[in-house]
Amino acid sequence: MSTQSTAPATSADSAAVARIQHRRTYLMCRPEHFTVSYTINPWMEPANPTDTAKAVAQWQKLYDTYLELGHEVHLIDPIEGLPDMVYTANGGFLIDGVAYGAKFRFAERVPEGPAFMEWFAANGFEVAEPVEVNEGEGDFLLVGDVILAGTGFRSTGDSHRELADVFGKEVVSLTLVDPRFYHLDTAIAVLDPVQGEGGVEHATIAYLPHAFDEASQAELARRYPDAIQVSDEDGAVFGLNSSSDGLNVIISPRAKGFEAQLRERGYNPILVDLSELLLGGGGIKCCTLELRR
Ligand code: ARG
């Protein structure tokens, strides 16, 4: 990772630390076949019309934003009949050139697993084929040297053990309890790739406390006393389903409170509207898979 630039100290009363941008490599999938033809989360309502051209245009804005920020974006070809393939975060979880493949919970998405694994192998990643049901970076988030792993709706607890075996890292299991926030990346945003020392300014992660059971809330509070806790209102518009490079945080324009919280901590929020893709229950982070070599 290379250092690009730092955030300017904007106001005199700002206690914010200088943020450092890290260059990222992402995998995305143009939503050419996007539609909502089945229901596997509470956001999906096949009776509501979708506009594929609008989905593509909104997605393009996200893609262009990454390039403008200096990130590298790879593309996987969309497959007809797999409308959820645009949500590449679910395609796997990759660290140090190793790709732990996804094994989807619902039949509608099962064929995506091998399609992504094929792409990883063809692009030089060592693929670890999954035995357990897991939905990749939708449920697994790397924070410093620790992996936060979600369960409750999609990825199983057994996949958390498999994940720990594959990567040899500490895995912290967190239980999601609200069906609207069925993947971990709808309830936690990793803001800083480096685990901070603690202290109010650092704000390594942001999360929605009510999306978790009590034990998980306590675990998050203990590990991240400096975290940004977002309001239910911002959570409900998928404010946390965002992507950060350590300085710039791409978020939904509807997450007004979160936008202000980010500014206070020295981050630079950039607003990108993916309203059409929210009809499928996904947002910015869902459309973004980080490729770590
Ligand atoms: N319709 C997709 C599903 O229910 C949306 C996936 C959203 N992805 C995410 N990383 N949260 O599986």
Image (cartoon, rainbow, N blue to C red):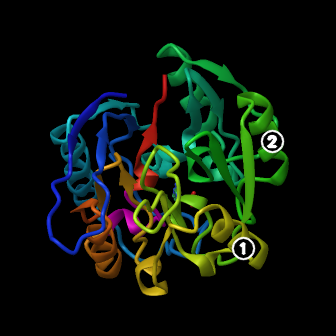
* Circle 1: residue type: Ala
Q: Which mark is residue 218?
A: 1
Q: Is residue 82 visible?
A: no
Whether 236 is among the magenta residues is no
Point out residue 207 in the picture as x, y percentages from the top left corner: 52, 69
Residue at coordinates 25% horizontally, 65% vertically from top-left? 273
- Segment colored magenta: 275-284
Q: Is residue 126 above or below residue 83?
A: above
Point out residue 198 in the picture as x, y percentages from the top left corner: 53, 59
What is the quadrant of residue 282 in the picture? bottom left
* Circle 2: residue type: Glu
Mark 1 sits near ligand 1, with its Cβ under 8 Å away: no
Point out residue 150 in the picture as x, y percentages from the top left corner: 68, 58
Residue at coordinates 72% horizontally, 52% vertically from top-left? 105
Q: Is residue 176 visible?
A: yes
Direction from residue 64 to residue 293 in the image, left or right: right
Direction from residue 279 to residue 14 in the image, left or right: left
**Distance between the alpha carbons at the discs numbered 1 and 2:** 27 Å
- Looking at the image, which is closer to me, 279 or 200? 200
Where the N terminus falls, by quadrant?
Answer: top left
Element type at mark 1 = helix
Select label 1 or label 2 by which is in front: 1
Q: Is residue 9 above or below residue 254?
A: above
**Which residue lies under the disc numbered 2?**
132
